[in-house]
Image: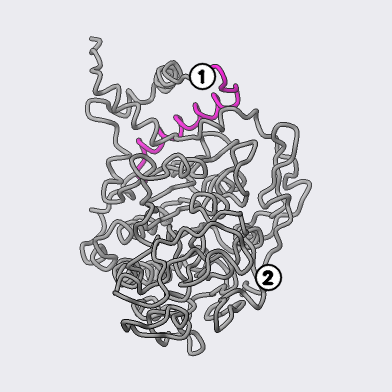
Amino acid sequence: MMRLISFEEKLARRDLLKKLGSASTAAFMANEPRQLLGKEAIEHPEATADACIVLWMGGGMAAPETFDPKRYEPFEVGLSVEKILSTFPAIDTAADHIKISKGLEKTAEVMDRATLIRSCVQADLGKILHSRHQYHWHTGYVPPQTVAAPHIGAWMAKVLGSRNPVMPAFINIGQRIEGVGEQEELKAFTTAGFFGTEFGPFNLPYPQDAMASVRPPKGMDAGRFANRYKAYKKLVDSNPNRDFMSDFQQESMLRSFENAHKLLESDEKQAFDLEKEPKENREKYGDTRFGQGCLLARRLVENGARFIEVTTEYVPFLHWDTHENGHTTLERLKKEIDAPIAQLVRDLEERGMLDRTLVIIASEFSRDMMIEGVPGSVATDQSRAKVDNLGEMRHYGLHRHFTGGTTVAMFGGGMKKGFVYGKTADERPLVAIENPVSISDLHATIFRAMGISPKTAYDVEKRPFYATEDGHGKVVTELFG
């Protein structure tokens, strides 16, 4: 007997399809990308990692307050902000020659497994905008682009494919795309771009609810979900851009539905259920979204995910976006990230997975009390705390967006252990003064670890589009063990 489907169930079904096959509308505009330089034409390096986890500190994590501590000045009313480089003292770590910032004591215990790149630099994009710099970091390209640039996770999904055919290759944990500030800007880079829907991210904004994302909506079992063509037709019919969707994009969306159906019927979907993890393990990661996101990332990598990003979540003027109350906010943030980072590294190591899993801690730029951008930049100053001397605690912290030098931390994946590369100046301006690493070179290094040539390219709209901008990214070979 045919059962009528309620309007609410239709909405629930559509929501599930969007979660399992999200894509940028701009991506639908592209024709099928043809691989211009394949494995037959270029030599892909031998991979040192099979999976990649990016721990994203959205909002501008201040390097002098975390992984590159500088001269410390405690809070004092009347203190000149010119004297302040760090608002936390440095602490020792498991690596004798590496110090990091107070508040990261558990992370300090695993720094003998880490490589620190202390000389990463971001491009001067005219205005220091989080959305532009986050787009640049995640895609390797400066917006706007004439085509939708793929996220680095989508590159890995496209070029390398899935490690497990039922597990999404690209998973995004902890970031809401809807209902937050700059949502359209976030959507612009959280996508597979011209690669198509099947290589896009599986978005899990709330890790504790991840299991609900791999269950059919109430009243719809997995068998009924298998009729992907009817579901697809309903979705296309309601899409005002359907007339512009290429045959390639339609086929890509159908394949994403196939992948969704495989996951719904698989045993691996249990990896999304954090309740399956022993309680004592869950407690080690903490009860925050970021902590549980790190635990979920470990479970998903264990079950074959290729690329996972876990974020503290970017929301304007929250979390790492510390335009005021910087020190106080960072005290809270460090408590939220310290244990999960250390536990993730330990868990991967204990399971024999760290050597083949590249864990990266990064942010779109750093921060400084005095300087916006880099010396000589005409970037618009967006800092809200503009004082010459400390008057109250909310002024104490690093406020301005600083692109002249920041730190990226890496664990596992073939990187050296207990290693520091590059250097920033000891006094302001805290710019990179040794071995600067651009976004393009950082991406080339990440791709190298994953076994992808930075010169890999696809022909889109009759022109090549490279994994690193114009294929010019240079691998920092000194980082590899």
Tell me where residue 205 appears, x and y as whole percent: 34, 47
- Residue 199 image offset from top left, x and y in percent: 53, 40
**Residue sitting at 36 percent across and 51 percent down?**
174
Give the quarter of the figure containing the C terminus. bottom right
Which residue, given by chain and number where applicable, does mark 2 sit on? 477
* Cα distance in 3D space between marks 2 and 1: 46 Å
Give the labeled residue for mark 1: 242
Residue at image location 73% in from the left, 50% down from the top = 470
Quadrant of residue 49 within the rendered picture: bottom right
Is 258 above or below relative to 395? above
- Which secondary structure lies at badge 1? helix
- Magenta stretch: give its range: 241-268
**Quarter location, residue 235:** top left
Which residue is more in the foreground, 479 or 77? 77
Q: Which image quadrant is residue 237 in?
A: top left
Residue 55 visible in the snapshot: no
Give percent across and percent down for residue 386.
42, 67
Q: Residue at point 38% right, 30% down?
A: 17
Identified at 61% across, 69% down, the residue is 375
- For this orientation, the residue located farthest to the bottom is 96
Vertical comparison of 370 with 129: above or below: below
Image location (x, y in percent) of residue 131: 49, 49
Q: Is residue 347 left or right of residue 465?
A: left
- Amino acid beneath label 2: Thr
Which structural element holds mark 2?
A: helix
Specify whether residue 459 is painted magenta.
no
Q: Which dot marks residue 461?
A: none
Q: How many marks?
A: 2
